[in-house]
DNA sequence: TAGATTGTTAATCGATTAACAATC
DNA sequence: TAGATTGTTAATCGATTAACAATC
């Protein structure tokens, strides 16, 4: 049952936060091209949202734009990176080196996101010892020790569903504060631990629903 | 600029639709265990949302629950599958067999979502001919012909950003109606073509923002 | 100066939650 | 019957959009 205390660290402006990486991506491109200023209408066109929504979103960064000129590209980049804590590199553990986990390790594109996996863990003794894609694989039990030693706060969870909650409990006990959840299980955590569930099926559902509805539309 | 006609096929209840796969997942598990009925409070607990939200969401399926008993598991499964068009297998093309595209082809887990890639396409002649993970790779120019022949409506877009819009135009011209967009580019399409953008960076942003905010919280 | 663009304040829209009657 | 659970109708909350004054 979702209790009120869960709200404490629930960030607000969730949709706006989700759009920040898209702004950042466009800003870096502009910066590469040597552009100094950018207006809300530029983002509006590229992202197909209203200019006013752009201005509202960018309020998060506390960067002020200049009338007639727009926002300073460099300032916005810094502002977004600061807001997200993406100004420094982010270390993470990866839990569960099965098919999905290995694929995340091996896929630069998937991880082209500023996150650096510094160690991987698995229950299966057969997988331990030999590095995968240059990342060492340790026995899951050694996680608390390593988490303390190298002060990692984020874990990427790729274990089978039936082990998800147990692994989560271990992570929480080890002081992990953010769990990027690639399982289908909704995790239970204390209020100061953030979980983010990724589910490709949601995206496909949106597309499928739109498609079946447009067919029904046609048939009417 | 998002014009009003874009709305025609914009599905509403978007958040609810995104939750449907999670319901489906739990329902299939219940079905496997031989359960006949399920109540909104079951989903509420598993998904950590309010029971009333569950009941609202399930309205989409038009399945009625019975007071005191709950919903019939089988009925709900059918209802959701029908709503999403997941009752039949969904064929798709994959465009761009680079690192990400190959990884999607190779990763059962990523695609454990009811989607079947029936053919892949690439611009690079070197990649054409030899199948990847059992899927044949064709020259991009042959897509219109094949789309017509095997009547595929969905494409998974994994090309480099600078080619994204051009590839999209080709897909649209070939009669593709749904584009699952794994590039960073916001695509422009006619109103009857649905696009769904997947971006892991959004998920990481949510987690990062929550983490940096919780630190600031602590320091106050 | 005139005009483009921001930022503020208010209005609208849609999603979630609450209250409670209906029902088996 | 009493009580658990749904489904309906209304209230609240948050996100987006609109209007427009401020500013360089």
Image (spheres, coloured by chain):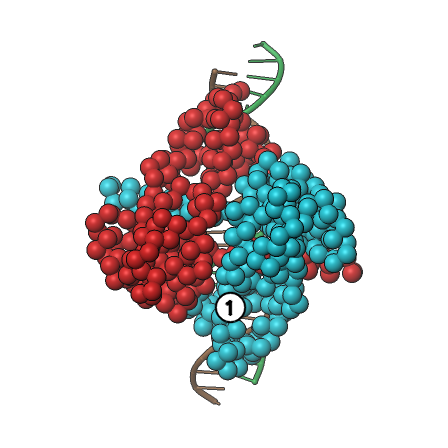
Chain colours: A cyan, B red, C brown, D green
Foreground of the two, B135 or B110? B135
Foreground of the two, C24 or B123? B123
SS for dot 1: helix
Using a 10 Å C-alpha cutoff, classify the residue at mark 1 as few (fewer than 14 neighbours), some (14 to 19) or many (20 or more): few
Foreground of the two, A94 or B136? B136
Q: Total label count?
A: 1
- How far from the left and from the top, in percent, is residue A61? 61, 68
Q: Residue at x 53, y 20 (%)?
A: B68
Q: Residue at x 74, y 58 (%)?
A: A150
Q: Residue at x 72, y 49 (%)?
A: A143
Q: Quadrant of residue A124?
A: top right
Viewed as shown, does residue A127 lie left or right of A209?
A: right
- How far from the left and from the top, in percent, is residue A195? 63, 48
Q: Quadrant of residue B196?
A: bottom left
Q: Is residue A68 visible?
A: no
- How far from the left and from the top, in percent, is residue B140? 29, 61
Q: Where, quadrant-wise, is the C terminus of chain B in this rendering?
A: bottom right
Answer above or below: position of B202 versus A165. Answer: below
Please state the chain letter of the residue tagged with numbered disc 1 in the rendered image: A
- For mark 1, what is the residue? A25
Q: Where, quadrant-wise, is the N terminus of chain B in this rendering?
A: bottom left
- How far from the left and from the top, in percent, is residue A58? 56, 67
Q: Residue at x 57, y 30 (%)?
A: B41
């Amino acid at each position: 049952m979702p209790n009120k205390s869960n709200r404490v660290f629930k960030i607000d402006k969730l949709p706006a936060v989700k759009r920040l990486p898209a702004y950042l991506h466009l800003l870096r491109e502009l910066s590469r091209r040597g552009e100094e200023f950018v207006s809300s209408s530029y983002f509006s066109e590229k992202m197909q949202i209203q200019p006013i929504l752009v201005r509202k979103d960018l309020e998060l960064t506390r960067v002020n734009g200049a009338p007639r000129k727009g926002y300073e590209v460099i300032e916005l980049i810094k502002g977004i990176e600061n807001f997200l804590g993406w100004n420094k590199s982010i270390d993470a553990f990866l839990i569960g080196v099965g098919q999905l986990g290995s694929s995340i390790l091996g896929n630069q594109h998937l991880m082209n996101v500023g996150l650096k996996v510094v160690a991987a863990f698995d229950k299966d003794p057969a997988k331990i010892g030999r590095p995968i894609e240059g990342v060492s694989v340790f026995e899951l039990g050694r996680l608390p020790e390593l988490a303390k030693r190298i002060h990692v706060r984020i874990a990427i969870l790729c274990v089978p569903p039936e082990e998800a909650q147990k692994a989560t409990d271990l992570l929480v006990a080890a002081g992990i504060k953010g769990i990027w959840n690639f399982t289908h299980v909704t995790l239970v955590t204390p209020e100061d631990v953030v979980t983010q569930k990724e589910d490709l099926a949601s995206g496909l559902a949106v597309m499928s629903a739109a498609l079946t509805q447009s067919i029904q539309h046609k048939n009417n």
